Each structure stands twice: as C-alpha cells, then as structure tokens.
Amino acid sequence: MDRVIKHIGTPRHSGRYPWGSGKDGYQRNKSFLGYVEDLRKQGLSEVEIAKGLGITTSQLRIKRSIASSEKRAAEAALAFRLKEKGYSNVAIAQRMGKNESSIRSLLDSSLKEKANVTAATALTLKDAVDSKGLIDIGVGVENHLGISRTKLNTAVGLLKEDGYTIHEIQVQQVGTGKYTTVKVLAPPNTDSVDVFKNRNNIKLVNDYSVDGGRTFLGIEPPKNVSSDRILVRYKEDGGADKDGLIELRRGVEDISLGEKRYAQVRVAVDGTHFMKGMAMYTDKIPDGVDIIYNVNKPRNSSKDQVFKKMEDDPDNPFGSSILQKHYVDANGNKQLSALNAVGYVPGGGEEGSWSTWSRNLSSQILSKQSPLLAKKQLGISLDLKKEEFDEIMSITNPAVKRALLKTFSDEADAAAVHLKAAALPRQSNNVLLPITSLKDNEVYAPGFRPGETVVLIRHPHGGIFEIPELIVNKTNKEAKSLIGDSLDAVGVNPKVAKRLSGADFDGDTVIVIPNKNRNIKTASALSGLKDFDPVTAYPKHEGMHVMDEPNKQHKMGDVSNLITDMTIKGANYDEIARAVRHSMVVIDSVKHELNYKQSYIDNNIAELKKKYQGKETAGASTLISKASSTIRVQERKEGKFVVDPKTGKRKKIYIDPDTGKKLYEEKESFYPERIKRVDPTTGKISYIETGKLIRRTTKTTRMAEADDAFKLSSGTAIEGVYASYANSLKGLANRARKEMLGIKDIPYSRSARETFSKEASTLRSKIALAFRNKPLERQAQLLANKIVAAKRRANPGMDPDDLKKIKGQALEEARARFKAKKIDIAITDNEWAAIQAGAISPNSLFKILSNTDIDLLKQRAMPRYTSGMSPARISRAKSLLANGYTPSEVADALGISVSTLSKAIKS
C-alpha cells in the first residue's frame, strides 16, 4: 500500500496541520507576534509592516489581537494543567520561562474569563448569523454586547477566517435623503449584491421586538362618527364662506380639543368617508347634532362629493400623516378620539404649532418685492452668518472649533441654495380661521396691535396683487370667543381668503407682517382673475385624458416657475393673469378632472414661455427659479486621491487646500435599464430588463453646483442681489473649510487624564450610552425603507407630497418600535475642564462633539465677555434695533435674553 501525505489545512488557517495540533500548539502565534516585533525593532512602522504583509493596518491589528488572544489562552491552559498536577507557581514559572507574577495572572480566573471573551463573542455572532442571516456589526453594536470595539473586531476577524463575509452597504435615510453606511456580517459565500437586495432583513445580534401586531405605521382603526351627528352646511346655506371649517359642540368627549382652541384634523365618518379641515368650537349648534361641516358644494351633492372617501389602506386611511388622540372617559377608561390631528410630530396640527415654523422670508416672496428690501433683509442674514463665523474663530479649543466650522460650512452652503432672508420685524406664521362678522379690510390678529396695518402673504402666491393689506381689529366679539388670545391664528372675512390665492379654511396658513412703513408692496386684485372658476371654465369632455398626480406636480412646478420668471422680468398684469388662471386649472386638474390642455391653449402659455423663458419648451430662466431646481450629476463620493508632493504617495483629501471647496471623485457605477410594462388585462405592473446599462447619477441643485451664482442670473436687478448673497455664503463656507485644514488637536495628556480620571470615565460612559442608539437608528431606517417601499408598490402613482408624508410617518413609527432616540451627551463643567486640559483622546473627543447639543457647545466654547455679548454681536444688535426690530425680536434672533441685550447695549 502506497503511503501519501495529506494536506489537512483548515479554511481559517493555512498549513499542513491545524493550528494548535503540535507539541507547542500555538507556536505559530508566537512566530507571528515575534516576526512583527522583530520588524518593529528594526524601525519599521505599523503601516510599513502591514504593507509588507499585503494587508491593511486594521487587519494587522486584528491578526495581532487574535494571535495574542490565542497564545494567552494556550499559556493559561498549560498553566492550569501544571497546577492540577501539583506544580507550584514557581515551578510552573521555571517550566514556562516566565516570572511568578505572570503565572499568577494566567491562573487568575477572571483573566481566564477575559481571555475567553473573544471566543464567546465570535460564537454569539456566529449563532446570530446562522439563525438570522445578515447581522449589523456597525458602530454602536459593541455597546449592546457590552464589549470593546476592539474585541468585537477581533471576534469578527475570527469568523472572517472561518469563511464568513463582511460587507458595507449604503442605505438611504428616509428622513434626510443622505446615506447611512451599514456594516454587515453575512454567511460564507455571500456577496455584496445579495446583501443589498436583502438589506431589509439585516438584524441586530440582540433581538428587538417590532410588534408584528401593529400596522406598518402604527395607526389604530380610526374611531368613526355617525353622519347622523353631522349637520352639513352647504353652499346655499353659507358653507362656502367657511369652506373646510369643522365646528364642534363643546363638552362632547370623543370630539374634544382638550385645552386647545383649534386644530387641523381628519374625522372618519360612517366607516367609509372622512372630513378634513380646521376644527374649532362654536356655541351655535342646533340640537340633535354635534358637528357642523362647512362645504362649498350645493345641496344636491352626493356623499362622495361632500366627504372624502377613505383610502383602502389601514396605515393611511386619510391619505395624510396623522397623530391619533386619546382621552379618558367618565368611567376612567382610555378611549380613542374621533379627532385625528394632521402631522407626525407630537403637537403638530394643533394650536401653538404654527408659531414654531421658520420665520425667514423665502425668495418666492421677497423676489416679488423691491431689490432694496431684498438687499436689506439678505444683508441682515449675511451679517448674522459673518458674526457666527467670527465667534467660532474666537474659540480656543481646536477640536470644538473644527467641529463648529464643519457645521457652519454645511449650513452656509445650504443657505446659498435656499436663499432665505431674515424675517421682517414682528413677522409671524398664522393659520387662517373664518370670522364672517369681520369687514373686508379687517383681520383679527391677537399678536398684533389694535388698529395697525398688516399684510397677509400666502406661500406660494402669484404676485403682489394677492397680498391684502388689512387693519387689525381686536374687539370683534365672535373672534374673541372663538380664537381668544391665541398667537398663531388669525381670523379673516371669507372674501379676504379668496384674495389669498383662493385659500380656504382646512389648514391654509399665511405670513402676517406689520406694514406701517409700506415696506411690502401690494396691488389691487387682478381684473383678469375676478369671478374666474376653473371648474366651470374647463370641465372634462368625453374621451379626454385626465392628468395624473405625478404629471400635475411637474406641470404645477413648471407654471410656478413661469410666474416667478415673468414677475421678475416685468410682465404686465394681463400676462400674469393668464399664467395664474392656467395655474389654477392645473392645481385642480386631478381633483376635478379639468381640461388643462385647453387652458394651456386659451391662455397662450406657449407664447409666455417663449417670451419670458426663451422657448416654448424651456424651464426656469432666472436665478430665483433655478437655484433649488434639481439636476442630476454622475454618482460620486466625497474625497479625492492626490499625490503627496513630500512623500510621493497617494492620499485622500476632502477639501481643496487652495479654494476650500469640497472635493468629490466620480464613481463608475451602472444599473440595468428596465422598461415598465402594464398588463392590459390585470393592470399588474412589471419591469423588463433591456440589457442596456445606465450610469448611476445623484441628485443635486443648480446653485449647489454653480461656482458663481451670477451664471444662473438672467441679468435683472433682483437676481443680482440674490447672486451676490449666494456668492458671499459660498465664500464663507469655503473659508470655514480652509480654516479647518490648519487646525491641530490639543495634545493628549496622560497626566491630565490621571487628574481628570473621574471625568474621563463618565464621558466614556456617556459616549457608550449615545452610541447604543446608532444600531437602533439603523434598524429604524431599514424598517422605514421597507415600509415606504411597500407603500410605493401599492401606489405607484404616489405624488411627492404624499410620499413625503408617508416617509415621515414610517420613520416615526419605526423609531418608536425600536425605541430609537438620539441621546445628546451633556457635558458638565468638570468634564469641560477635562476636555480643555487634553484629558480626552482626539478619537473620544470627536465622538463627544458629534453627539452633543451644538448650541450648548457654542455657549461653553465661546469666549466670555463682561457684557455677555461679543463686540460683533453688540454691533449687530444695534443694527437690528435701528431697522425696526423690537428688543425681544433681537434677543430671539441672537439667542440671548432681553436683559442681556439691554445690559450689553448700555455698556
């Protein structure tokens, strides 16, 4: 019989025999560690050693950790065997060539347990992958397992050598549209394509219940109100004057607003329909009913015309985001209210929520005013940005300065795209409510002074002819009874609402601005819009193609840009009336099945586009309409490889050192082209691949890509004002990034760490607590993506507004299920002293700064002034006061108290 020598190497270890099978079972670990140590003694760096071995430095560290762990485990096992045979610690030390203290360490049971942590962690991960498939091993998972990141990486390294695979995939965040990297441990022979296709099945090592009994969006079946309890007030009865208002009887539990006076709601009716609008109390409800529903429909209207039909979707029965309300009944039992507040943020859609909206002036509003006013308000915004930059540059802690400069540069870039200007003095956001007893030139506005003149602006609006100028009446009895002293609602006569781009009372909002000095230009209503009713002017005809929702959104954006461009370029009111009439047809084209094509012809929109946008098929033609318009560029990733002139080696940089601009590198990424097919019999949608590859692109905006904003301008004065503002912001962003490059960290001090050992320990604990949320947030994002994908499959024609609502609901629900909630690291005075002294390592400090409240961080980091304000802020405050802002408004804008402002101004 021939004898053969078989190679029995394992997948994890090369060589003829398994590691650990020889006389000295782990001599290979000794050899590897010794080899690395010899190289270090020869003067080679860790990077050079890793390069020589053909691996990364991270892989080298993992291999060293594995080798050290296994070597120590083998030595501990030998020491225990000798101890069991009766050897003394001294004898064991002589036998193993070590000192006695080392032997005591090896025999220490706690250290033995510690040596087993890596193996135990690897086994836990292996069991999780074998049972669940794909496991998240990204940042923060170690905090759930109760081990260090190094031990987790070492355990993962062991499994990798056993054939398990590691992948990093990019998952789009539902809330922001940015991407989150998910690091995944997968079974052997799994490729990245499989992981991405099954990204919705990525799990945590620890099991978390996602409450499979709930609907996707956590919505309970809504409580229905019987139509017998509802009095419909039709057009002939005055319902059109309060169209959208839902009037409630006081003291009825299931329709109570609680302590609120009004709310934007959805109310289910008879299990098939629902009401939508603003709900508020009234004292004039006939006996036998609890609700009055005001509509602009005639008495002979069907139920489907008066009420909205509920969607056949338990997650979204009203077609909008809602927050369900509960109450405790007379018997002490918790009950579901029939009122469902609109929104997905607690408190949204109820009295008080409108006052939290941003008070900046959009370019859509300000560009229709004088260049002088635009320059003034944009100048205020720019000065505030410059002041913020100067204050950040005065910070002495380099790590904090770098973190705040990074945030500042991103915010300045975003501001250059959105082009929002500072609010005017005492400007506020308000929801509209109907008060029929008010005169046509009056407004009930509790937050404003009796008798003063204010303007109401709806966003968007066609022009200054849709801005009514009204006198504040605070004595109207009806308004005082219904609205009282609420600061985020205004009452108007229905005729005023019609002037506001045809607003109604189902939650439409306006900006209210005092106009004593006539800063805001207004004009009389256009005669070309008087009594124009798009529904009667352009009804559907037989065989007509009815516009779908996605197409409506596209065409509405197109005509809105046209109106903006026409206004900026000085179109006359007759021309603007044509475009506005067409926009009114387009916006109702789906709801009322209107003949929008005939409106396009009758209003000669093609001629207007050619005259004001260059050609009939053109789009946005001015900087205002172009700035935030979406364009697609080749998919790219941040950073660019360059050759270091000093070393001759390639390195990746993220900021151009000369200009401060962000650097990107284009990705050669493609996907297969697919053609949509609809089965004519079943209507089922399928997609067929053509065999053609399409280059992947990513969305951005024209302004974000423009080096010079003036290149987007058509040359008008107002565009010049905005172009200068955008360029200044871009310059500030680039300057901030350049400053970041020269910042060096405070040297890490071991002596400081000893001095502040307690603070260093508490900060590490806070980091661990903050990082526990990261895996939960990734799970929430994965679940939210799964929910949104399911909703889109069920409704392929979903319009962008509805999709945005679904995304918001899905993310809130997913976070609730996983209890994902960001926990900011609160820094105490002593901990801040530790940071300033260099007691915290740069890596830990980066984690702290990335997970703390930026505003509180600024307060700690900014230099202290005896007046409480820097010279730059005092100068800015005086400028704002000179421009008509009240002390409280200035204090609010600067984030200080009125007393601090007063003290600083007088000093």
Image: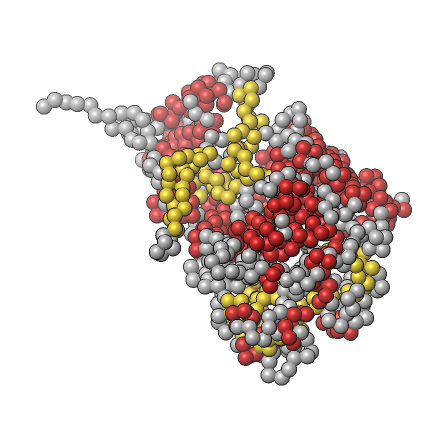
Instruction: Please say if 70 is above or below 521.
Output: above
**Quick one: which residue is furthest to the bottom in this view?**
287
Instruction: Indicate the position of residue 170 as horizontal and vertical percent values.
Output: 48, 40
- Between 577 and 805, the residue placed more toward the observer is 577
Q: Residue at x 41, y 46 (%)?
A: 676
The relative height of residue 687 versus residue 338 in the rendered view (above or below) is above
- At x 51% / y 16%, what residue is drawn? 43
Q: Residue furthest right?
A: 906
Quadrant placement of the N terminus? top left
With 115 as the anchor, is 492 left or right in this view?
right
- Residue 82 in percent (x, y) is at 34, 33
Tally of numbered tags:
0
Q: How is the image coloured?
A: secondary structure
Q: Quadrant of residue 837?
A: top right
Q: Is residue 28 visible?
A: yes
Residue 355 showing in the rendered view: no
Where on the picture, by quarter, is residue 243?
A: bottom right
Image spot of residue 264 (x, y percent): 62, 64
Image quadrant where one finds the C terminus: top right
Does 561 sit above or below residue 516?
above
Q: Residue at x 67, y 40 (%)?
A: 622
Q: Residue 284: horizontal and vertical position, in percent?
A: 68, 79
Q: Residue at x 64, y 25 (%)?
A: 657
User: Observer-nearest residue: 5 or 720?
Assistant: 720
Pick the front one: 547 or 871:
547
Q: Is residue 12 above or below residue 420?
A: above
